[in-house]
Image (cartoon, rainbow, N blue to C red):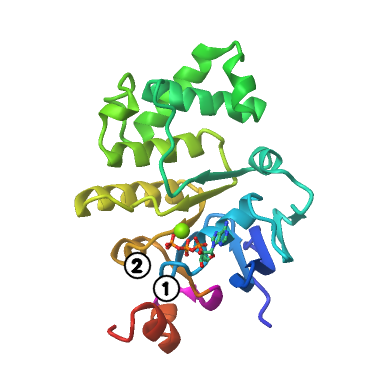
């Protein structure tokens, strides 16, 4: 085994995680480490177990075997809320804005949630103006500065995907988990959002990105993790991973 360079501080460690749903092995003995400041692309065909692994990391799904560590601490006993407070934020595969609230208030609520770790409590949190200021700057950061007062339902999907990212960033996460942020976007929107993800990473944000859009993943992610049918196929530098014959035949159907 090679030892990692001293500058490599692990933020996330997944160790020998296995998840079974009845007879289906959704995740089979997966181990991976994400270091401070890395942007890791997580790819694999439909049903590969990507979302399931993400849910193990956030605590939504309990693995039958293995463990997850955040900054070296075993999360086995931590609830989802405790993991969020501990520095994990997830932008989900399906966008879930609060439709009755403006874009600004959607993010302000997340800003309050970062303090109280409960959406309900944050409704009663008093210091709303400060949260709104933070929310405004977060919306500007993700390119939504022009639509702060709009209701989510009036905006295209591309905007709502950015809203999800802003809400996740409001938690000032040590680890940002993104599940298919580019899904449903056209090519130009996908490129713009991928650029934003890259910018966040260049600003120091550690990111695990699940994504089917291979073009954008290969453009922005220096490191790739590939899973197929629950089984880890390859993990490492993107160019090396894409040369792996197993990755080419399984993920790209042998056409690459
Ligand atoms: N809650 C659940 N109960 C039972 N089976 C599940 C559950 N969640 C996922 N599965 C199964 O686990 C396997 C992996 O699913 P998962 O959603 O993690 O894949 P994925 O890689 O995220 O796929 P996609 O790219 O389509 O989002 C699939 O066979 C799926 O049907
Ligand atoms: Mg999924």
- Percent position (x, y) of residue 37? 53, 55
- Percent position (x, y) of residue 51? 51, 58
Relative to 236, is 60 on the left or the right? right
Tell me, yes or no, whether the highlighted magenta stretch contains residue 231. yes
Quadrant of the image occupied by residue 218: bottom left
Report the residue at 38% width, 30% height from top. 139
Quadrant of the image occupied by residue 43: bottom left
Verify CB contact (< 8 Å) between mark 2 and mark 1: yes
Give the residue at mark 2.
218
Quadrant of the image occupied by residue 159: top left
Q: Which disc number belongs to residue 56?
A: none
Residue 29 position (above or below residue 243):
above
For residue 226, say whether it is visible: yes
Report the residue at 59% width, 71% height from top. 24
Q: Which residues are magenta?
A: 230-239
Relative to 139, is 13 on the left or the right? right
Tell me, yes or no, whether the highlighted magenta stretch contains residue 29. no
- Going from N to C along the chain, the mark reached first, 2 or 1, is 2
Relative to 126, is 185 on the left or the right? left
**Mark 1 closeness class: few <14, some 14–19, many ≥20 residues within 10 Å:** many
* SS at mark 2 in the image: helix
Give the residue at mark 1.
238
Q: Is mark 1 within 8 Å of ligand 1?
A: no
- Percent position (x, y) of residue 10? 65, 60
Report the residue at 53% width, 13% height from top. 128
């Amino acid at each position: 085994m090679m030892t990692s360079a001293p500058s490599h501080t692990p933020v996330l460690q997944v160790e020998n995680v296995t998840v079974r749903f009845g007879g289906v092995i959704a995740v089979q003995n997966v181990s991976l480490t994400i270091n401070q400041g890395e942007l890791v692309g997580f790819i694999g065909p439909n049903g590969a177990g990507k979302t399931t692994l993400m849910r193990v990391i956030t605590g939504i799904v309990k693995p039958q075997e293995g463990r997850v560590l955040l900054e070296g601490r075993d999360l086995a006993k931590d609830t989802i809320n405790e993991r969020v407070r501990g520095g994990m934020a997830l932008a989900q595969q399906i966008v879930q804005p609060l439709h009755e609230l403006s874009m600004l208030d959607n993010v302000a609520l997340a800003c309050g949630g970062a303090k109280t770790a409960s959406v309900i409590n944050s409704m009663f949190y008093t210091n709303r103006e400060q949260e709104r200021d933070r929310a405004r700057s977060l919306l500007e950061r993700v390119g939504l500065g022009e639509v702060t007062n709009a209701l989510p339902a009036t905006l295209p999907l591309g905007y709502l995907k950015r809203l999800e990212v802003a809400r996740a960033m409001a938690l000032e996460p040590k680890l940002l988990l993104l599940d298919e942020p580019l899904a449903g976007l056209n090519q130009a929107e996908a490129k713009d959002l991928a650029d934003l993800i890259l910018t966040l990473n260049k600003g120091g944000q550690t990111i695990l990105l699940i994504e089917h859009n291979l073009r954008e993943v290969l453009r922005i992610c220096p490191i790739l993790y590939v899973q197929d049918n629950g089984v880890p196929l390859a993990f490492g530098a993107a160019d090396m991973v894409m040369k792996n014959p197993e990755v080419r035949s399984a993920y790209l159907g042998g056409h690459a």
